[in-house]
Amino acid sequence: MSEYLPVMSDQVVLFTTDTGMDATLLSHVRPYSARIYRFSYESELGATSVSCEEGGNAPPLPERRKVPGRAY
């Protein structure tokens, strides 16, 4: 992955499941990522929450905000 990602393209969207992207693979992907988004279903709210973190190649994130009860 660390050899493949840098030569794929300037902009790539990579969708994986939590089982497909383990900590080892994430450590290879992070240096080439501007943002890493995680989608988590919260059954008590009946909604999906989205979190965003900086990758290794990113300008600073804007202030984060979460809208309670909103599905993204």
Image: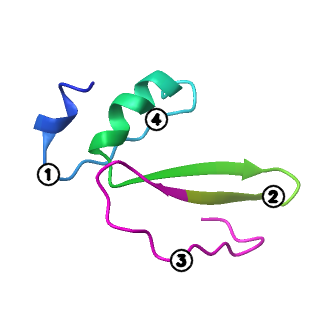
Q: Amino acid at mark 2?
A: Gly
- Mark 3 residue crowding within 10 angstroms, few (<14) / some (14–19) / many (20+): few
Q: Look at the numbered disc 1 and give the secondary structure of its residue.
A: loop
- Mark 1 residue crowding within 10 angstroms, few (<14) / some (14–19) / many (20+): few
> Mark 2–mark 1 contact, CB under 8 Å?
no
Gap in Å between the C-alphas at discs 4 and 3?
25 Å
Q: Amino acid at mark 4?
A: Thr
In the picture, the quarter occupied by the C terminus is bottom right
Q: Residue at x 81, y 58 (%)?
A: 46
Q: Look at the numbered disc 2 and give the secondary structure of its residue.
A: loop
Q: Position of residue 19 (x, y in %)?
A: 56, 24
Q: Residue at x 27, y 24 (%)?
A: 1
> Mark 3–mark 1 contact, CB under 8 Å?
no
Q: Which residue is mark 1?
A: 10
Mark 3 or 1: the one toward you: 3
Gap in Å between the C-alphas at discs 3 and 2?
25 Å
